[in-house]
Image (cartoon, helix red, strand yellow):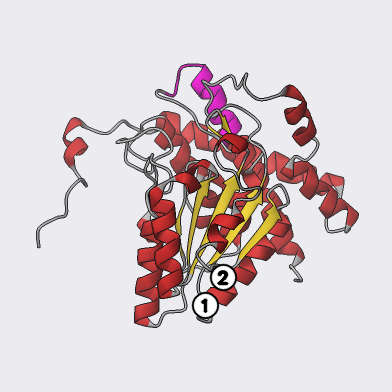
Amino acid sequence: MDIASKDLLQLYYYLKLTRHLEGRVTTLYRQGKILGGAWTSYGTEAISVGYSYALEKDDVIAPYFRDMGAYLVRGITPKRIMAHYLGKKTGVTGGKEGNVHVGDIKLGIFGYPSHLADNLPVAVGAALAFKIRGEKRVAAATTGDGGTSRGDFHEALNMASVFKVPAVFFCNNNKYAYSTPLTRQMAIKNVVERALAYAIPAEIVDGNDVVAVYTAAKKAYARAREGGGPTFIECKTMRMHGHSEHDSAKYVPKELLEEWKKKDPIINMEKYLLNNKIANQPGLDEVDKRVKQELVDAEEFAEKSPYPEGKEAIEGLYATPL
């Protein structure tokens, strides 16, 4: 699949934006400025950036907590995200939540709940609605390898297959479900075998290669739009830190981390752009400079934003009577 140079450069930009934004969130968390916890996608950014960039405007996503790249690609700005983490009124939830439970239905992003795989049935419902209406729209949903062991994952895939809905499922296979390694979760070698059990076409891609993720997603979306039904894509990657920033991940072998450090998705993309003469080093440096300035502006915006008033705590919780 031919990908325009401008799109390849945008993929790189979103990889860098995701990495730096979450890096800053981690720093603020360790400084005590972010309460609760901090969950990031360090080392796995290519998955959320790749699958979301391949979507069209009217498509929807049912993300999970390592999908910061998808939030950014779909249009949630760094300013809103930073304000969200600081509990400000200008944040994604208006100050009602300060971690990863975000969504914006106007941008086609379903809000994410903590229980992994709960978002998959939601995506199937949306995809079924698209099919009934005759709309060429797609619902993309993600979860981790651990999420595929939950009942709602299997219920969602079964229904998607039976009704042949335009949904594409992505598995962020980062080797660990919190501290449980893949070998203690399932006896099968590859997660895609779970999708094949429901007669859903499945594919394994390099989750650290944003071009590979984008290409696989684009093909699956095209198939779904033409009535071909769901697809399952397993993205093999490695979580390069603990489950969250409070987790030291001592249970992960150091040699495994060293092995995957060489496969960093940003380094991979830089090599791709340079080797194919799509960008030069000064150009890549300029992207880095641009991203860092965006985050300076975002943090300044968040710091200056007001906290919500007490009465706003109960607004937006229930449907407004007609």
Residue at 66% x, 47% y is: 189
Marks 1 and 2 sit apart, C-alpha to C-alpha, by 6 Å
Quadrant of image for the C terminus: bottom left
The residue beneath circle 2 is: 221
Q: Check contact, mark 1 vs mark 2: CB within 8 A.
A: yes
Q: Position of residue 266 (x, y in %)?
A: 74, 43
Location of the N terminus (image quadrant): bottom right
The segment highlighted magenta reads 22-34
Label 1: few (<14), some (14–19) or many (≥20) C-alpha neighbours in 10 Å? many
Examine the rendering and report whether any part of residue 160 can be seen: yes
Name which residue type carries label 1. Answer: Arg
Above or below for 130 versus 246:
below
| 319 and 33: which is toward the camera | 319
Image coordinates for residue 281, horizontal then vertical, percent: 85, 45
- Identify the residue under disc 1: 225
Question: Is residue 108 in view?
Answer: no
